[in-house]
Amino acid sequence: MRFIKAEKVTFEYIRRDEDGNVEGINRAVDSVSLDVKEGDFISILGANGSGKSTFAKHLNSILLPTEGTVWVDGMDTKDEEKILDIRMATGMVFQNPDNQIIGQVVEEDVAFGPENMGVPTQEIIERVEESLKTVGMLDYRKDSPNKLSGGQKQRVSIAGVLAMHPKCIVLDEPTAMLDPVGRKEVIRALRALNDVEKITIILITHYMEETIYSDKIFVMNKGKIAMEGTPREIFSRVEELEEYKLEVPQITKLAYELKKQGLRLPDCVLTVKELADALSR
């Protein structure tokens, strides 16, 4: 079942001078069309300025298209009467977890969204416990967020969105400010949400390694969809990705260079195990 449909979405920023006069127009998103099925794990890649984060903000009505249409769970994001329903269906997680965490205690922070939705107290308690357990943070429920690592804070941010029972979570560069350990923690949590809870995940990132388990990858360049396909299809096009200022995962790049030197390897290797198996054969 289709959950998100974007049809020829264009978004333009108006540039103004100090006096408020229009200096020009920047087209950040340029006629983007894509479909996301319920339960998909989708990654959107792109260099800085490619339009991926701007497009992500269209998926729960933070931004509205200048042209074109976005449907979320059958609802037009431009329909003002549906904005709350759209935002309940599609939660957003941003780069900096410190900007999303507002509670003094972890469980209070996770409870904030459901409380604003008017969820009954007993159900809030159950949702908080369920959400923290899902992201592996239940043991920290009484802790101050200030004592947590970056990866732990981001998992609390995800739990706060989960407690609102969305069908989909859109994550805009959620690991950009984290160390490698924190990045792995967050991606592991996202994969579990998708595999076990069947929550649709849309991951906006420029870390290639985070996307290898996606159902589909979209690559954006200059506001347009430049490439789309499975991880194996996308990462087999090493030179094309490099033209868009993107690098394939390190293990994929290593296998690519070894193959160029004459080793008989598959066209696209995504994991260390795949490369080890291919070399041993």
Image: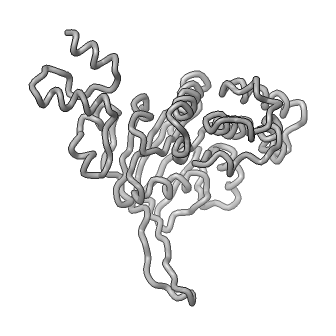
Q: Nearer the viewer, residue 280 or 54?
A: 280
Please tell me which residue is depicted at 50% across the width and 34% down the height of the picture: 180
Please tell me which residue is depicted at 27% across the width and 45% down the height of the picture: 241
Q: Report x, y in % for residue 19.
A: 57, 90
**233 horizontally vs 211: left or right:** left
Furthest residue in direction right, as rendered: 121
**65 horizontally vs 265: left or right:** right
Identify whether 63 is placed above or below 197.
Answer: below
Furthest residue in direction top, as rendered: 281
Picture mark count = 0
Identify whether 273 is placed above or below 27.
Answer: above
The structure's colour scheme is: one colour
* Quadrant, the C terminus: top left
Please tell me which residue is depicted at 9% across the width and 25% down the height of the picture: 262
Q: Report x, y in % for residue 89.
A: 65, 43
Tell me if residue 166 can be seen. Answer: no
Q: Report x, y in % for residue 94.
A: 60, 48
**57 horizontally vs 100: left or right:** left
For residue 27, which quarter of the picture? bottom left
Please tell me which residue is depicted at 43% across the width and 32% down the height of the picture: 214
Tell me if residue 84 can be seen. Answer: yes
Q: Report x, y in % for residue 66.
A: 50, 68
For residue 270, which quarter of the picture? top left
Furthest residue in direction front, as rendered: 147
**98 horizontally vs 169: left or right:** right
Identify whether 12 is placed above or below 239.
Answer: below
